[in-house]
Image (cartoon, rainbow, N blue to C red):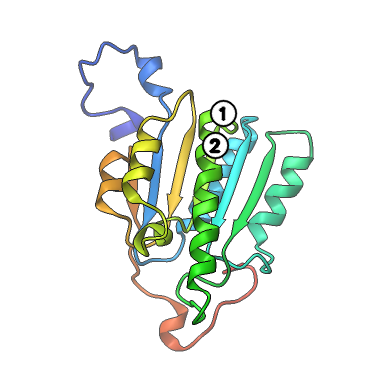
Amino acid sequence: MPRGKPENVPDDGLTTRQRRNRPLVIVHTGQGKGKSTAAFGLALRGWNQGWPIGVFQFVKSAKWRIGEERALRVLGASGEGGTVVWHKMGEGWSWIQRPGTEEDHAADAREGWEQIKRDLAAETYTLYVLDEFTYPMKWGWVDVDDVVATLAARPGHQHVIVTGRDADPRLLEIADLVTDMGKVKHPMDAGQKGQKGIEW
């Protein structure tokens, strides 16, 4: 896309402005770091535009104090940009599942998805961040076909960002923007654990 201009313009009967302002389904996937970070960066842009934002965080612990959460909550309450509502479902990082807790996580994920469906139907937010949402789909906790059909048929002007590794091909098919973040090098390769200000 040289100089911000599309290489191909479809013959779809839409004006440039209509085509430019269509709501997007965005997927950040891949093995590399930065999928959620990029999604929260987009949330900052949405906040600046005055958009109401709904963040739905799957599988990260409700006990964790995530830096983006605090920043977006403060900004959302400031009265200067858009509002921000933050929902947490599930517990534990996506690569750590404690034995015996799978069913509780599955129920939390299903209820989270049902809330998203209600909010999409009501057009509650302009921007939805479905953080780590690929995992409930991969693990069979949430029906992928239901997700795909709901996102494809969502009413109004609602952008949706889905993050997480191993995004289902059916989700990628209906997405408007897909970024696959590859890992070249990571501190964990050298035995270094996550640290404040970088991972949270």
Q: Say what secondary structure mark 2 lies in.
A: helix
Q: Is residue 41 left or right of residue 186?
A: right
Residue 176, position as x, y percentages in the image? 33, 37
Vertical placement of residue 50 versus 189, above or below: above
Q: Nearer the viewer, residue 17 or 97?
A: 97
Q: Nearer the viewer, residue 196 or 60?
A: 60
Q: Say what secondary structure mark 1 lies in.
A: helix
> Which mark identifies residue 145?
none
**Gap between marks 2 and 1, in whole Å?**
6 Å
The reply to whether the C-beta atoms of the residues labelled 2 and 1 are less than 8 Å apart is: yes
- Dividing the picture into quarters, in which one does residue 140 lie? bottom left
Q: Amino acid at mark 2?
A: Arg
Residue 60, position as x, y percentages in the image? 56, 66
Image quarter hosting the N terminus: top left
- Dividing the picture into quarters, in which one does residue 61 lie? bottom right
Q: Amino acid at mark 1?
A: Ala
> Which mark identifies residue 122?
1
Vertical placement of residue 77 versus 103, above or below: above
Badge 2 density bin: few <14, some 14–19, many ≥20, Cα 10 Å:
few
Badge 1 density bin: few <14, some 14–19, many ≥20, Cα 10 Å:
few
* Residue drawn at the location 32% of the way across and 40% of the way down: 175
In the rendered image, the residue lying farthest to the right is 78
Image quarter hosting the C terminus: bottom right
Residue 113, position as x, y percentages in the image? 50, 48
- Residue 42 shows in this picture: no
Label 2: which residue?
118
Vertical placement of residue 57 versus 200, above or below: above
Q: Nearer the viewer, residue 168 or 185?
A: 168
